[in-house]
């Protein structure tokens, strides 16, 4: 496996690097045993608070005694290396642990996840040995709980607009600013803070700092009254002329944006695992509800429309779990270019969870709307997943634009060659010929390098689904080529077109993960025993084919401009202007 190859970047050029995804990743036996032990302890802890979680949601906070229990159970040590007092779980094991916590309570999962996924992840990824030795042991015991401080008032997805400033003053940095909606803000003692360094406005770059609560000038606001995740601590964090030692600069000065993105990319398997855990719980709740509720003298589990809801939830959960596990496996194998795949897993899993929550509530009918049942809290808790750690709207643009970069570079090389074609016709026409062949391969699927354009290791039982994937790959590569030729640099402004590209990419990657997982299932236990999983692959491939056909057709024929004009009309009037009166 090549460590610096992105499966999806390559796919936009029509190449399938199957060695990245096959065989489907599995935990080593020793790590699996550790995880099973952790999960056993977790269940004992969380089941003992099953009745408390709804009450804590109503009151809007965890009691200090419960946070202390999380410390005692080692839930703040999950990803910290053993030499610093942690469990040393890798991404797959950590993701599976958060999945289990999320089955019981989303606020608990977010408290643990914000600490490990993003709060102190920067220290793990970019900290030096002295910083790690100083802070990791305290973070492992939970003596220090961590928080990630990036978002500000007026600066959400646009990290470049951050106002917090860090000015060098002798041996210290002096930081001033305000951070908004900081998970764990009220209980954290360790903050990963992002601030612009001093200098002319146009030259100010983001840097990352380790800030601790005991530094003069650090304060937090009141507990935020949220729609969901109500028991988890969310506050503002204020920094008023906070003197931070130069030794607390995390990574290099001016590299803060890269550090922030590295943290978010690495931590997305935690959020994805939480989403999968939430879906599994929803399937349990919905199946029990459907079998106990009787309408028209029949259990509603016998009705076709209810079966469809449950079946769709199962397919989406399997698909999300496959993608999240694949990304965690890639990271654990040392792959370095996984940002697009991590973003895809977050978008797909969070949207699949939202759909599952909505449908589970629908299966419950009127009961689902009542607070005595768990569905309404789950719906409230679930909604934030499409917003935090990168909104799904922004991530769609990130997914498509980054993956199309290679296609754009190819077109630039062609354009440069055309300029010099008459000066060096042999070289020029040779490059044009190579690119023409490449475009023909995209359109026909024929290639002299068949291993690059097709899967060769999937189970034969998945031949039809493999053909759908390979067809989708050609459609994706052709669409990227077409959009870049049509819009050039202005593709950045064409967000609706870019989002369609992202949807194709998202579903192709998840389908590839499903095919890899089902192939491994067939290999391990035989096709008859894997019959249901083969069905999942068939159903999901059919879903993906329909999504791709729709997205591709809308590249050329759509109502985008009309929709945007209607939006402008609403903006101008600041209301809906029509009325039947």
Image (cartoon, rainbow, N blue to C red):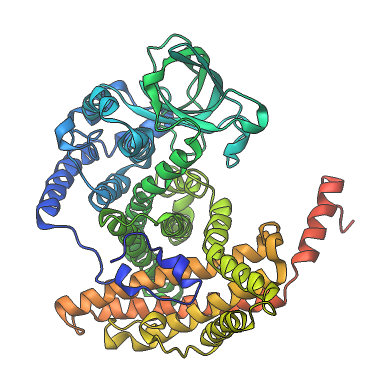
Q: Quadrant of the C terminus?
A: bottom right
In depth, the one of 553 and 539 nearer the eye is 553
Give the vertical position of 237 relative to 423 (above or below): above
Q: Nearer the viewer, residue 165 or 436?
A: 436
Say how many tags the image has: 0
- If the image is split into quadrants, where does the N terminus sit? bottom left
Q: Residue at x 67, y 78 (%)?
A: 421
Q: Residue at x 37, y 67 (%)?
A: 319
The location of residue 287, given as percent across then percent down, is: 33, 63
Say which quarter of the image contains residue 74: top left
Q: Is residue 447 left or right of residue 288?
A: right
Residue sticking out furthest to the front: 423
- Residue 58 or 530: which is nearer the viewer? 530
Image coordinates for residue 518, horizontal then vertical, percent: 27, 75
Residue 411 in view in this figure? yes
The answer to whether residue 225 is visible is no
Is 306 positioned to the left or the right of 483 in the image?
Answer: left
Residue at the far right in the pictured view: 581
Where residue 75 sits in the image (x, y, percent)? 23, 35
The structure residue drawn at horizontal position 46% and vertical position 61%, both measured from the top left corner, is: 359
Q: In the image, is 540 to the left or to the right of 494?
A: left
Q: Is residue 288 above or below residue 305?
A: above
Q: Where is residue 508 shown, x and y percent of the image?
A: 45, 72
Residue 259 sits in quarter: top left
């Amino acid at each position: 496996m090549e460590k610096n190859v992105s499966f999806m970047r390559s796919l936009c050029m029509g190449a399938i690097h199957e060695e990245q995804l096959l065989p489907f990743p599995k935990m080593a036996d020793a790590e699996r045993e550790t995880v099973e032990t952790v999960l056993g302890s977790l269940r004992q802890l969380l089941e003992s608070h099953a009745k408390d979680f709804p009450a804590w949601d109503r009151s809007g906070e965890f009691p200090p005694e419960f946070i202390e229990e999380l410390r005692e159970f080692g839930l703040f040590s999950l990803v910290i290396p053993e030499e610093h007092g942690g469990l040393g779980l890798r991404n797959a094991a950590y993701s599976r642990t958060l999945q289990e916590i999320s089955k019981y309570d989303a606020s608990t999962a977010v408290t643990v996840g914000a600490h490990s996924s993003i709060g102190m992840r920067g220290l793990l990824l970019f900290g030096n040995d002295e910083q790690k030795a100083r802070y990791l042991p305290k973070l492992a015991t939970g003596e220090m709980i961590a928080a990630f401080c990036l978002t500000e008032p007026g600066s959400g997805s646009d990290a470049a607009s951050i106002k917090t400033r860090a000015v060098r003053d002798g041996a210290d940095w002096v930081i001033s600013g305000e951070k908004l909606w900081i998970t764990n803000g009220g209980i954290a003692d360790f903050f990963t803070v992002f601030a612009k360094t001093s200098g002319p406005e146009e030259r100010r770059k983001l840097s990352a700092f380790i800030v601790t609560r005991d530094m003069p000038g650090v304060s937090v606001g009141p507990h935020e009254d949220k729609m969901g995740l109500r028991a988890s601590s969310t506050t503002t964090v204020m920094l008023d002329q906070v003197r931070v030692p130069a030794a607390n600069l995390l990574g290099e000065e001016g590299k803060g944006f890269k550090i922030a993105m590295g943290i978010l990319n690495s931590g997305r398997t935690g959020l994805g695992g939480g989403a999968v855990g939430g879906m599994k719980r929803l399937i349990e709740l919905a199946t029990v509800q459907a079998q106990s509720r009787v309408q028209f003298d029949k259990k509603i589990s016998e009705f076709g429309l209810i079966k469809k809801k449950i079946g769709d939830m199962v397919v989406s959960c399997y698909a999300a779990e496959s993608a999240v596990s694949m990304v965690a496996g890639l990271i654990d194998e040392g792959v370095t270019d996984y940002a697009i795949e991590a973003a895809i897993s977050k978008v797909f899993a969070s949207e699949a969870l939202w759909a599952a929550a909505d449908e589970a509530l629908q299966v419950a009918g009127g009961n689902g709307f009542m607070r005595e049942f768990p569905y309404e809290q789950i719906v409230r808790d679930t909604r934030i997943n499409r917003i935090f750690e990168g909104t799904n709207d922004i991530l769609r643009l990130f997914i498509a634009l980054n993956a199309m970069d290679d296609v754009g570079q190819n077109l630039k090389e062609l354009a440069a060659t055309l300029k010099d074609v008459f000066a060096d016709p042999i070289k020029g026409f040779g490059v044009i010929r190579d690119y023409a062949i490449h475009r023909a391969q995209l359109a026909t699927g024929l290639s002299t390098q068949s291993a690059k354009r097709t899967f060769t290791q999937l189970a034969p039982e998945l031949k039809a689904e493999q053909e759908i994937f390979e067809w989708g790959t050609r459609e994706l590569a052709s669409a990227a080529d077409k959009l870049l030729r049509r819009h050039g640099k202005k593709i950045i402004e064409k967000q609706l077109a870019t989002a369609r590209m992202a949807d194709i990419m998202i579903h192709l990657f998840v389908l590839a993960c499903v095919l890899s997982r089902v192939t491994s299932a067939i290999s391990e236990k035989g096709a008859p025993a894997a019959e249901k999983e083969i069905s999942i692959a068939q159903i999901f491939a059919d879903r993906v084919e329909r999504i791709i056909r729709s997205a591709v057709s809308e590249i050329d024929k759509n109502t985008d401009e009309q929709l945007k004009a209607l939006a402008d009309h609403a903006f101008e009037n600041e209301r809906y202007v029509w009325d039947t009166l």
